[in-house]
Each structure stands twice: as C-alpha cells, then as structure tokens.
Image (cartoon, rainbow, N blue to C red):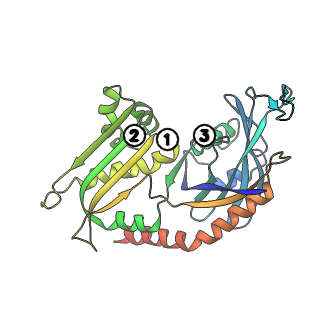
Amino acid sequence: MAKKKKRLEVVTVTLRVNDYREFTFADFLMDPEISERDIKLSDRYVRLKYLEDCGDYIVGLVQTTKMQSTPPKNNVTTGVLSPLGLTNVEGLAYPNVFLFEKHRGILLYEISKEGTYLNQFEDVIYRLSNDTWYKPFDINFKTVYNVDSLEKLLSMGEKKTLEIEVANPDYLIRKSENEGKAVGEVLKPGKDLGADNFKIIASVGARTSHVLNGGFINSVLSGFQKLIPQSDGAVKHIKLKGYTTENKDSLTEVDLVIDTMKLYIKVNERKNMADLQPTERKQEIQSAYRSAIPDFDLYFNKLEHAKLE
C-alpha cells in the first residue's frame, strides 16, 4: 500500500457581511443547516462532511460525487470488459480535506484534480447559503506566501520590473471585478486583442534612479493575491523584481504564483476504497497545520509589523 503526497493550498479567508447580521466563517461551517446538504454543480454533487470543531480550528471534508459516464473495468487475465455497475443515483466520490483556523482565518485545502477546486469551493459556499439567513455576504480567499518571499515583498522599496503572464485574460477580468480596478486595467489589452495567453513586462533601468509606480503596483499585487486562488490556474506568473532595503547591490525577485506557502499530506492509496479515509486525512492535515504554526506566526507578525510602520 503506497502513500501518495497531496499538496495543500494555503489561503486566508475574509468574510464581509453586507447587513446587520453578525456571523463568522466558523459559524457557517458548523451550522447543521449548512452541512450534509448536497449542492449540484454541473455533473457533480458536492457536500460538506465529517466536520469537527477542534477549538482553535475546524477540520472536515468536501465530498464530490461525479455523476458522469464511467469507463468499463477490464479483467487483464481474460480480457473481458464489464460495467462498474453504478445505478442512476450513484457516482464516484472524491475528497478534499480542509482545515480552517478561526483566529487568523487560515484555510488549508487539499488539491485534487478529481475533487472540488478551491475556486469551486467558493461557489459551493454561496450555493449552500441559498435559502438561509446567512445571505447576503461576500467571501474572499487570499494567497499566503512563504515567509522569505513575504519578507522580500515587504522590504522591496525600489520596484524595477513587473512581469505578468496569464491565460484567458477576459475570464480573469470578470473574476476580478470585485477586487478593484488595477487588475482589469492591466489585463484589458489582452482582452481587447482577443488573446488566449497574455504577457506583459513593465520595467525601468536597474541602475537608474527611476522606479515603477509603487502605489499602482501594490494595487495590482493585492488584486492578484485575491484572484490567484479563484483563477483555476489561469494566472501563470506574477514576477516582481527590485531592490530590498537589505540588498541594494543585486535585484531580488518574487513570483506571487510560485512563492506560496507549500504544505503537504500523505494518504494511503488503496485500489478498492470503501470510504474517503476521513480519519486519516484529518489526522494528516492536523499534523501539517501544527508543523506550520511557527511559519504562520512569523508570517502574520511580519504583516502586522508592516502595518504599524
């Protein structure tokens, strides 16, 4: 029995309530009216399962049941093909384990190409709130970078080069409508050209006194930080080069897409699974979270310190 390595996306969750109602994302997740409800998304059903409140955090699974046609099974000894035998109300089930830390709004979310992607999870949340007292509200996911990259970003005073590479700029502009105007302004030429792939490079001389417009770049980076988790991989690279206060002799580079905080779990792979291994998955993600707490502490301390300066 082999263990397979699974990556966890790491984001922060911001919930903005649009009227007098007061609730948190933790309240939403643990509400019995929300959990154990199936949401139909295209050819699949999605629901939250095995939710557990562990005090400082909540852990659970997103169960995705795909209802599309399935290939036959093959007996390699006899060469006989036969159906899997699923009925009309049965489908193949896939998991995404997640952990949500209440205090800082940190969300760890298992990446699985067969399950529900993080940007689809956002849609599931809105759909689960239909016909409940929770509506209306807005939810945003923001990418969490690794600590070294965050430190470079915060200390990069002189910004010399910004390189942006995306697919489907029209789609990204529509997805970024709630994240300010900067992203749309940068990607608009790609949309106007009808491009499937779009890349821009803005730069000034590395050894000149000229610098890129820091205020506008910060708006662009902030917008992309929220857009990346819901872009379904359409944002390929957001590279920023400049001089930090610690190193004014050579350029420092950060890539907002590549330099994210990376955490992993390992799960036993069985050929004929009878469940989604909820206990094993939850134990693995809890272990990954506990191991990352020192990095989370550093990360948020640096953010807080930057706000006070």
Nearer the observer, 284 or 181: 284
Of labels 3 and 2, the one closer to you: 2
Secondary structure under tag 2 reads strand
Q: Is there any visible trace of residue 220 in the rendered image?
A: yes
Secondary structure under tag 1 reads loop
State left or right for residue 207 relative to residue 255. Answer: left
Dot 1 or dot 3, earlier in sequence: 3
Is disc 2 in contact with disc 1, using a CB cutoff of under 8 Å?
Answer: yes
How far across and down, in percent of the image, does residue 271 sit? 80, 46
Residue extending furthest toward the left:
208
Dot 2 or dot 1, earlier in sequence: 2
Image point (29%, 41%), residue name:
200
Q: Name the amino acid type tagged 3.
A: Gln
State left or right for residue 197 relative to residue 99. Answer: left
Nearer the observer, 232 or 213: 232
How far across and down, in percent of the image, does residue 3 sit? 72, 58
Q: Name the amino acid type tagged 2.
A: Val
Please give the residue where the numbered disc 3 appears in the rendered image.
120
Nearer the observer, 303 or 22: 303
Q: Name the amino acid type tagged 1.
A: Ser
Please give the residue where the numbered disc 2 appears in the rendered image.
166
Q: Is there any visible trace of residue 24 in the rendered image?
A: no
| The disc label shown at residue 31, or none | none
Location of residue 5 with respect to 63 vertically, above or below: below
Please give the residue where the numbered disc 1 appears in the rendered image.
231
